[in-house]
Image (tube, helix red, strand yellow):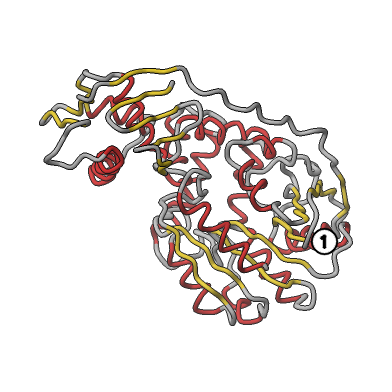
Amino acid sequence: MRYVFANCVLDTERHEFRREGALCHLEPQVFRLLEMLLERAGEVVSRDEIIDTVWNGRIVSEATIAARISGARAAVGDTGQAQEVIRTVTRVGLQCVAEVSIEAPEPVAAKATPGPLALRMTASEDGSLIAWAEEGEGPPLIRAGHWLTNLDRDRTSAIWGPWLARLGRGRRLIRYDNRGTGLSDVDCGAPSLERYAEDLLAVADAAGLETFDIFAASQSLAVSCVVAARHPDRVRRIVSYGGYPQGSAVRADAGSAAMAEAMGTMLRLGWGQPDGGYMKSFLSLFMPSSSPEQAAAFARLQLASATPDRAVEIRDVISRFDVVALLPEVTAPVLVAHSRGDSLHPFSQAQLLMQHLPDARLLPLDSDNHILMPDEPGFEMLMEAVDGFLA
């Protein structure tokens, strides 16, 4: 729908918000809150209804709710005193009091359907087959294998599709599925830090790369550091996004170890079930500000990536990564990008990287998500920083 009110337009088809004709960025939860109020213009919407719709029933703090309401007011030009669009009904909820008209959405150009995937397979050192693919032209960038990927499905995924499109702009983007996941060999040996490092090198060799840059997300940062320390002549630069040198099971704080144990239960019982309680808890760690559509896409991605048992096995292995002692040997420049509010791998892990890497630059991102959503301001900030760093 296309809602027109006050001096604003909210277009749900294009996922756009404009005020006085200017395109304005809204956080996903602020956008959904506004959409809900406009859908029910004139009605008083209760706090519980807001939580059910905007946060998909997940437990959220009063501060988080207040921040999103404040964001919605700021977007439409309201304040806590001048409530010309969004009125607070004390101890009840919110009400859209502006006059709202609904127009047919402007047509959106159809998205091109990706052609057949040019899938390739290469054998790692132990003989396990690793699926990889490449797209685009330009300087080579390897997206190091990490949790929850599928070479084919990622291209159209609401989670990874925008990442691939942006990272591949002006580059030869090379990516692969970790052993035992996605389109790689399911019948492989037990995963380990050593095996993952061998897999990355096997893909680089198969692609004919003498030197290359690496985009390392989450646990693949530790893998990339192993490769860079052992082969300084091959790794030119590394971008770390949400990367950590120490897995949750080996960190000093007791909370991280408890979380690592709880994660196994969440995975076994909630894998691929977007509406289940375990998945909601899982999402509250990975993507607390995700929309219901993004949460559903994440669940589909889980099923396309790995079985629950394999996911638990991988999670146990990566939670025990510890490459702190190796970091001083990584001579390649590293861009350390990390969400300030990441509760899965806290910002202190980025600080630990900065403490021990010889040549590192820090990029803090204002987000609570471990997986940055493409419609967050931090996404484009990250990509612009990547462009400049890898230039």
Q: Name the residue under label 1.
A: 204
Return the residue nearer the eye: 291 or 73: 73
- Relative side of 152 to 81, left or right: right
Residue 271 % position (x, y)? 56, 34
Is the residue 91 above or below the residue 171 in the image? Answer: above
- Relative side of 351 to 167, left or right: left
Q: Rate crowding at label 1 as few (under 14), some (14 to 19) or many (20 or more) other CA atoms within 10 Å.
A: many
Q: Which amino acid does label 1 sit on?
A: Ala
Question: What residue is drawn where x is 59% and y is 80%?
Answer: 359
Quadrant including the N terminus: top left
Return the residue nearer the eye: 347 or 29: 29
Residue 282 % position (x, y)? 47, 41
Question: What residue is drawn where x is 69% and y is 70%?
Answer: 226
Total marks placed: 1
Residue 380 % position (x, y)? 53, 53
Return the residue nearer the eye: 20 or 11: 20
Return the residue nearer the eye: 17 or 326: 17
Is the residue 208 above or below the residue 107 in the image? Answer: below
- Relative side of 377 to 238, left or right: left
- Which quarter of the picture shows residue 43? top left
Quadrant including the C terminus: bottom right
- Relative side of 350 to 206, left or right: left
